[in-house]
Image (cartoon, helix red, strand yellow):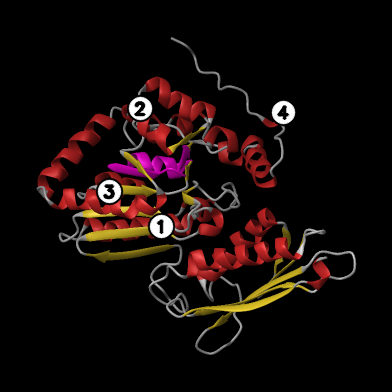
Amino acid sequence: MSASFDFQTTVAYDTAGLQFQVSLGGAEEGGGAAFALSAADLATGERLSFDHEVCAALHDFTRGYTRWLATRGVTATRGEEEITGTAREGLSPAQLLQVAHAAIDMIDQKFSEYRESVLGPPRYSDIVFEKRDGVAWLMLNRPETFNAKRGVTMDEMADALLDAAGDNDIRAVVLSGAGPNGFCTGNDQSYDPSEEYAAYAGTAGVTYSQVLRQMPQPVIAAVDGYAIGSGNIMAYESDFTIATTRSRFGQTGPRVGSPAAGHGVAMLAARVGQKRAREIWMLCQQYSGQEALEMGLANSVVEPDQLWAEVDRYVAAIKNVSPVILQMQKISFNQHDDFIKPERSPVAEHIPDFLSSDECRERRTAFLERRPLDPAKNMPYVDIPIR
């Protein structure tokens, strides 16, 4: 049935300065429909390479988009300037049309958000940042990975948040994620931390997490979709968390081999209590927006179409009170959290080489390949004397 299907379209984004050519169809006898995607400079029509130096946003998107296509039944390969692939055999024309629409929608989720051209030297490739009406708006713009963060993302977040922190006209900061699926799903596990540590974790001298906690302005996490791993940490490090009915919160570190420990882990107990915090971190379960509200992980939960109205309500309340008193109160709450100093970590003390271990590599690759992990690769417990 798929042989009769032929879909071709061009989608353009004036502000981002890009256009995409997408096709799906033309299946050979007995095979699945062929998929292809390429991009061009909107001003010149010149086809673009996916090289990071040519366009960091395009390079990053096509890398994640190629993996995302597999969730829609398309096995794809990313070339130098084109993604090509084959849809699963046996899909009807109606099903193929759904695949095509999803493929276009994912492009739109990312590139409709940019406020400036992504060609040349744009300030940011992985986030969208703007300041208006006394509010700094920072959106993670990697919807093809459910807004998982790579090193570039975190460095850009740190830079933007420092900008906001130093602006006396900014009264509140709002964090969000592009698309309806994810606020942030942690660190991008397609980067190998043992070989690409800077690409995985960034190089900023002051991390975005440090800025979030220390900046004078209240920070609101507007969570729509998944807040997982360090995305969940980012939500509970924020001063306020607004969830929607489709939000999901949870941790994944022990499951995927991300050695989170120390201050960022322990501070959750101050939000939800010791028993619940240990459950969240040690069992890697997920929780709905309503469950997050009930346990104290969120301040409110609304329907998705009411999220920004709820954010506006919080912003209006913040603007109605003293900025400097709020700053002093934020410092006070942080002092309560600092019963463990941020720089102390049992990982650094006891398993400093974990990121290059067989267990770390096995858990990361098993997650990416969606397969059961090999427990034989687990590291033994560290022999720490009990006194």
For label 4, the SS is helix
Disc 1 packing (10 Å; few <14; some 14–19; many ≥20): many
Classify residue 68 as left or right of residue 386: right
Instruction: Give the residue type at disc 4.
Output: Ala
Q: Is residue 170 above or below residue 384?
A: below
Q: Is residue 57 above or below residue 181?
A: below
Instruction: Give the residue type at disc 1.
Output: Asp
Question: Can residue 252 be seen at all in this image of the molecule?
Answer: yes
Classify residue 70 as left or right of residue 262: right
Instruction: Give the residue type at disc 3.
Output: Val
- Whether the magenta-drawn stretch holds residue 246 is answered as yes
Q: Earlier in the sequence, mark 2 or mark 3?
A: 3
For label 1, the SS is helix
Disc 3 packing (10 Å; few <14; some 14–19; many ≥20): many
Q: Decide: marks 2, 3 in contact (CB < 8 A)? A: no
Q: Which residues are magenta?
A: 229-249
* Quadrant the C terminus occupies: top left
Return the x and y of residue 84 as percentages of the image width and height: 72, 69
Q: Which residue is mark 3?
A: 219
Residue most extreme to the top: 387
Query: Which dot marks residue 274?
Result: none
Q: Is residue 360 above or below residue 117?
A: above
Q: Which residue is mark 4?
A: 376
- Residue at screen point 39% across, 54% down: 305
Query: Which dot marks residue 155?
Result: 1
What's the CA distance linking mark 2 and mark 3? 19 Å
Q: Earlier in the sequence, mark 4 or mark 3?
A: 3
Q: Earlier in the sequence, mark 1 or mark 3?
A: 1
Q: Earlier in the sequence, mark 2 or mark 1?
A: 1
Q: Which residue is mark 2?
A: 272
Return the x and y of residue 372 as percentages of the image width and height: 71, 35
